[in-house]
Amino acid sequence: MRAWTDKCAYLSRRGRRCLESTAVNEVKRILVIRQCAFGDYMAARPFLVELRRLFPEAHITLATVTTYRYAVPEDLVDAVYVQETRGNLAAQWRSLRAIEPVDMLFDLADTSRSRVLTLMAPAAIKFGFPYRSFFNHLLYDVGLRRSNYHYEAEVLLDFLKVMGHKPRYPLDFAMPCHPGAKAPRVIAYFPFASQAEKSLPLDAWSQLIDQAAAEFPDYRHMLLEGHKAEESGDFLAEVTARHANVAVQPRTPLEALGPWMADVSALVCGDTGVRNLALATHTPTLGIFFRTLPYRYWPRYEACHEAVFLRSGEVPGRADILQGLEELLVRVYPERESPRRPAVGEAS
């Protein structure tokens, strides 16, 4: 293989020698380090799909930690290694020493734990994209600059482009796929986030869904409950009582959540793992951003995703969100009649 790099990447002499002396069919064992939460696992799925395409004969192990087991993409790898992080130092050391030699290692995490694992794991060549470049010389043979101004799932594929791989577009997440114009007229809302400050307050969501139900009467408006006890739809009781087209979707097991999400017309939510699930099913999304960079979670390779954020950094209002929702529905479903019937004198 040729090392397809220039001044945008770090490439050690050992890394160049390894790549140029290795054929694709000679790569037999690969370790991928991804220690993260639900949404980040969704973003890693295209990388694992394309990694399998590039190295069809390789045994792929995904390394995670005990605290991040929800939504691990076990269906895309041959084995899962769980790094011990809760036991005593002896147990953690034994866990690190349990890693077998591999031909390639990809550190997709860039955390203190992933760096320790990268250091300890025996590998012929190690890939990483640390935010601090001095780790390149300490840990990696190939170091790429990570950009948070592009959709993360695409950024991860840069590792494979170093080896001349051609990823397929739209990205393949190996998930249920949205049916396009055949999707039922359902708009889903997920008002929760791992950090409360990343999402609108619940009363703002209540007012938003209340107004959306009136102005988009041909759609059913479904609030999706989260898997945590506090992520309940009880706060929407008055709105569901007032509108026949508003309902709450009870907590849904992960294995059923993908097909459910793929079957709605659009998802409206903030920076959450559930948004990443919708991106993985190619379901149209309207993301609401004010705390985090929108670009990292906003695919631009398909027109069914939109982000609502203000240049000032202020929290978008209901008028901004409803306008974005209208524009998204018109763009994605041009064959449907105009979806919005603004209520006269409605406040924003």
Image: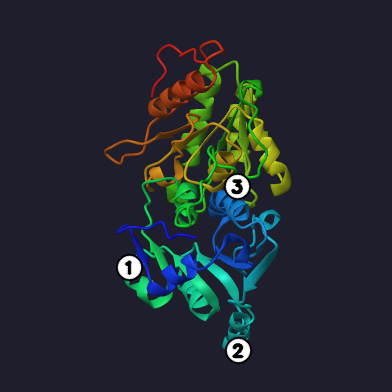
Q: Please give the name of the residue rendered at 37% of the width and 58% of the height, measured from the top-left corner.
A: 5
Which badge, 2 or 3, is on the more N-terminal residue?
2
Location of residue 141 in the rendering, given as x and y in whole percent from the top left corner: 42, 71
Residue neighbourhood size for the residue with mark 2, other residues' Cα within 10 Å, grouped as few (<14), some (14–19), many (≥20): few
Q: Which residue carries the number 1 mark?
A: 133
> What is the C-alpha distance between the residues marked 1 and 3?
39 Å
> What is the C-alpha distance between the residues marked 2 and 3?
38 Å
Of the two numbered discs 1 and 3 in the rendering, the one whose residue sits closer to the viewer: 1
In the rendered image, the vertical position of residue 251 relative to residue 24, given as above or below: above
> What is the C-alpha distance between the residues marked 1 and 2?
31 Å
In the rendered image, the vertical position of residue 295 relative to residue 328, given as above or below: below
* Amino acid type at mark 1: Ser
Q: Which residue carries the number 2 mark?
A: 90
Colour scheme in use: rainbow
Location of residue 344 in the rendering, given as x and y in whole percent from the top left corner: 43, 11
Q: Please give the name of the residue rendered at 33% of the width and 57% of the height, measured from the top-left corner.
A: 6
Q: Which residue carries the number 3 mark?
A: 231
